[in-house]
Image (cartoon, rainbow, N blue to C red):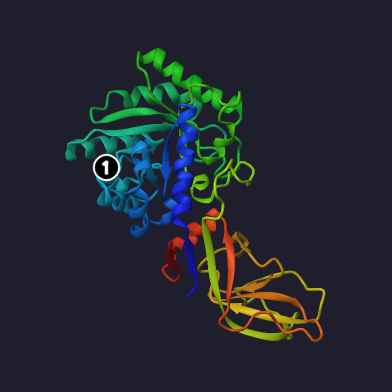
Amino acid sequence: MAELVIKSDKIIRNVEKLNVILEKHNVEWTFIVKVLSGHKEFLRKLLSNPVVKKLHSVGDSRTSGLRAIKEINPDIVTMYVKPPPIDSIKAVVSYADISLNSSFRTIEALNIEAKRQGKIHRIIIMIEMGELREGILRDKVISFYQSVFNLENIEVEGIGANLGCMYGIQPTYDKLLQLSLYKQIIDAKFNTNLPIISGGSSITLPLLGKAAMPSNLNHLRIGETAFLGTSPFDGKKFRDLSTDTFEYTSHIIELELKETSPDGLITDGNIGHTADDFDYDNSYRAIVDFGLLDVDIEELTPKDKSLRFAGTTSDMSVYDLGPVEKGKKCKYKVGDKIKFRPTYMAVARLMNSKFIGKKIL
């Protein structure tokens, strides 16, 4: 079975380093753990670390993940990090202390359920800042806030924005300044003081300590940089964080010398994806034990740089070992492992697959 290796100590060290960096700049953060798909064994190891007590909260986009967190430690403040579906309101109030919202109808439902459960449910109102994902339109911010302000079992924790996730809109100074100004307008009009301006995700981290980040932006929602050590802003390593946190291992189940071009009539009935033509006629082809159902091949990079992707189907993939050199034996054999460096999205899909083993170091 193909296996995702999780280097937990390096991930925990990343979380500790990030917390030191963010504390230095007076920014709180929510540790987004949705990439783990509620994997209890790893969550238990992760959440038992003392650094978690220093965090603002721990977030997930599934109530099953939040339930797992509360079962491990009910004292951890949890955040549901997308607008809740109406049919999940009961679970959201049960397992999330805070949720991100952009629909008044949903917040009304949260208010009713929170009253039924005897709770105060905290919300962050998301504002549309150009990414065209969740967020109320900017010209409706005041009227929207006014609508939710007097709901008895709802407490507005602050305002926030999503940037970089769908279209890749960068968190510029102009975008973040607008967000901070809305907080000031709400505070002035309603004689309040919203505690949080949530300025985005890992993509905002490179702006820390720079003029491009308004001083009153005081909260981020971070997943990718903590787990992978990289910034989605530029795909590069963030400061001195470790990027060697996950390794994906597959097994060679067939290895043969084959032609590099298919033989026969090609139809539209194939479900696989293949690489471009090769500039040599024959090569060793290694079939490994994962496919499209498990992960997007483009999100994996072989650690052996001589390997080249040849094709994939639902549950098997093929890698080309290069042109055959006369008198030189193939360096692999059936049963050997091929190792990959996965991206954040690859880790998310692999953690979600019941057909992929998980090994926690």
Residue 313, percent from left and from top: 58, 74
Badge 1 density bin: few <14, some 14–19, many ≥20, Cα 10 Å: many
Q: Residue at x 34, y 52 (%)?
A: 65
Residue 260, percent from left and from top: 75, 80
Left or right of 15, for residue 43: left
- Residue 136 in sight in this render: no
Residue 2, percent from left and from top: 50, 72
- Residue 137 in sight in this render: yes
Q: Residue at x 40, y 41 (%)?
A: 83
The quarter of the displayed image where residue 279 is located:
bottom right
Q: Residue at x 48, y 65 (%)?
A: 4
Left or right of 189, for residue 317: right
The quarter of the displayed image where residue 272 is located:
bottom right
Q: Residue at x 48, y 33 (%)?
A: 22
- Which residue is at the front of the view, 144 or 158? 158
Numbered label tally: 1
Quadrant containing the C terminus is bottom left
* Rendered view: 166 above or below 339: above
Question: Secondary structure under badge 1?
Answer: helix
Mark 1 sits on what residue?
93
* Rendered view: 150 above or below 349: above
The amino acid pointed to by label 1 is Val
Residue 319, percent from left and from top: 66, 74
